[in-house]
Every structure is written in structure tokens, then in C-alpha cells.
Amino acid sequence: MPLDPLHNAVRRDLADIRLADRVFAPHYAASVQRVVVSATPLRQGVDLQSGDLAELVIGEVFEVLEFVKGRAWGRSPGHDLVGYVDADALSWPSV
């Protein structure tokens, strides 16, 4: 049974390692938790014209699986949705 990519972090090229027992993907990634530091939309696609799925607010957790073109792809556990956010809206680990 196929997984819904709106709620499960799975694409043709990459999947969340937590789904490895349910889906085959060429690559798996372990999520890295980041905190939203400025409100940002969770979008369906990497480009700014793609539809908004939800608005992430400051303090929410976002589970990043990939950074691409200034965006982060991953899962918002609070909304149970998968999509793209502006990478600059997320916290970075301190060095």
C-alpha cells in the first residue's frame, strides 16, 4: 500500500529512515530537528509559487530531511504534514 507523501516523508529519491520498513527508496535520511525562528509557510513544493499547506509559527519543531535551494524539506509533526519551508526560518545548531 503506497504511503501518502503529504503525511509521510517519502519521495522517489529520498525517504525518512523511519519508513525504511514500509517503503523502498534509493536514499534514506534521518531527520534533524530544528525550531522555527520566524513564521513561515509550509509549502507543497520547493518553489515559492507552490501551494501553502500550513503556517508554521515561532517555536514549532520542523524535522529536516534535506536542504535544497534555500529551502528545507521535511515534516512538521505538529501539523502531520510534509513539505518545504524557507531554511532561514529555522534554527541552526550553535557551534
Image (cartoon, rainbow, N blue to C red):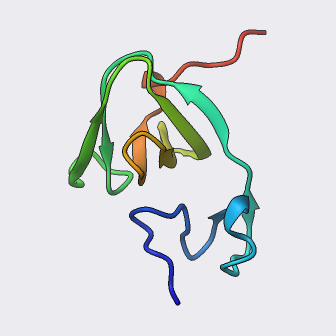
Q: Residue at x 59, y 42 (%)?
A: 64
**Residue 86 image offset from top left, x and y in percent:** 40, 33
Q: At 74% from the left edge and 50% from the top edge, which residue is drawn?
A: 30
In the image, 45 versus 24, the foreground residue is: 24
> Vertically, is 43 above or below 88?
below
Image quadrant where residue 24 sits:
bottom right
Instruction: Give above or below for 59 relative to 1.
Output: above
Measured as percent of width and height from the top left, residue 25 is found at 69, 76
The C terminus is located in which quarter? top right
Q: Given the current orientation, which residue lies at the most extreme right position?
A: 95
Question: Residue 88, how many percent across, how many down?
Answer: 46, 23
Q: Which residue is farthest top?
A: 95
18 over 13 or under it: above or below:
above
Q: Quadrant of residue 31?
A: top right
The image position of residue 65, as x and y in percent, is 62, 48
For image coordinates 44% across by 69% down, the residue present is 5
